[in-house]
Amino acid sequence: MTAEDNTVSHKTAHTETLQFIGGLLLIMALGLNLRPLLASASPLMDNIRASTGLDYGVLAWLTTLPFLCMGAVALASGRLQRLLGESRGIMLSLVAIGAACALRQVSGTGMTLLSTALLGGAGIALIQALVPGLVKRRFGARMPLVMGLYSASLMSGGGLSAWISPQLAVSGGWQLGVGIWWVPALITLVAWWVIFRRDSAPQRDTAAIDGVRPRRLKRAWLLALYFGVINAGYSSVVTWLPQYYHELGWSELAGGRLLAWMTLFQVLAALVMPSLAQRQGTADRRGLLAVALTAQLVGYLGFIFMPQSLALVWNAVGGFGLGACFSLGLILALDHLRDARAAGRLAAFMQGFGFMLNAMSPWISGTLRDMTGSFIPAWALLAAGIVAMLLITLRFKPARYPQVMQEAG
């Protein structure tokens, strides 16, 4: 190889490295924008309730509506991707998230809060549906690592907003606390447009998986149920955890910090568990999933029986379980198929119905709180769901993936 060839090879490697880092940073930036719409309102529920007159059951819709959107948009993501293109779809989603947050900052009515939950939820939903397939296609063998960083960023956005929003509300009111998150959405939008504006062509239809659509596969429905239940705790925790501890005598600032503390361990899990999955050398995720589900179960039992004395411990352990389950759940779906676009479609289907199950969790928890005067029945219901999912985890044997992906429901 000549010196000129070495120079060209070095430049190519350098360019590929920069493209990898740039793409990775943008994926992480996307993740940071996907939870402030939900988490920023959580520690400010008392202020919002006093200002709007909404009860717990209605306030739960601030989380329920975005998750319903996540489900509905994920199911339609194939058509939307063909219509808009991958990059254009992501940019429009960022516009929707930014507009929803900005509207909350200028208008604090109950109707505004609920309508922006729909608008922002649609934007969040489309990004979440597009990212798994995008990551598998662009990052190949590094998919578990990149999905872990994406999940960690997603969790970080929720934690940062839960921590910062109450502090902003002290000086600028609760509307500033829930509305300021249009700023990072705008920054990410500009960065995405600069880097990927030429990569916006719609892509061909890949709805069929080896001749069978996801909705016709028994395994696709099982994955949707599994993903929905193992992540149902996140939507309830993000909505009600600060309020639960507020009722135990904690301040709003302390409740927000506690949710941020939990998020630290969600981020840790989202980084560690996918890295372990990549190093396994096998697609068998059952051991890691069992660890994550057990951690969630320990957290819920702690909330029920010893919420005050070891609050930091239960929130750390439960948060680790929640963070691990989200990222491992996505990796589990992507493991089932080799083709990147087909795997992305399967992951979108799983998220579609899974997020619809997630959507009901905060509403059920809020309704149980209204009926019983306590959040403990909600934690007990979530714990029971985790026990059931521990049993279902045994069914995810990689050797059977080719067979189960042919079994129609």
Image (cartoon, rainbow, N blue to C red):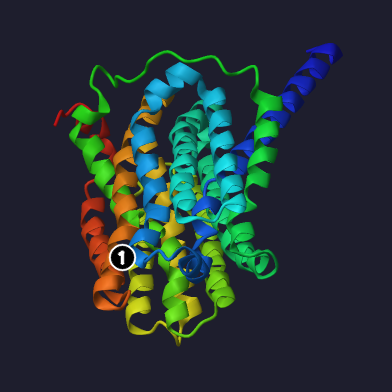
Residue name at image x 44 percent, y 70 percent: 241
Where 307 sits versus 294, above or below?
A: below
Closer to the camera, 186 or 143?
Answer: 186
Q: Which residue is mark 1?
A: 365
Image quadrant where residue 292 sits: bottom left
For mark 1, does the 10 Å Cα neighbourhood hold few (<14), some (14 to 19), or many (20 or more) residues?
many
In the rendered image, residue 73, in percent from the top left (x then y), is placed at: 38, 34
Where 161 sits versus 307, above or below?
A: above
In the rendered image, residue 259, in percent from the top left (x then y), is placed at: 52, 68
Residue name at image x 21 percent, y 59 percent: 388
In the rendered image, residue 46, in percent from the top left (x then y), is placed at: 48, 71
Quick one: which residue is furthest to the left in this view? 409
Residue name at image x 43 percent, y 62 percent: 239
Where 199 sits versus 52, above or below?
A: above
Q: Is residue 290 visible?
A: no
Closer to the camera, 193 or 297?
Answer: 193
Tell me which amino acid carries mark 1.
Ser
Left or right position of 225 against 74: left
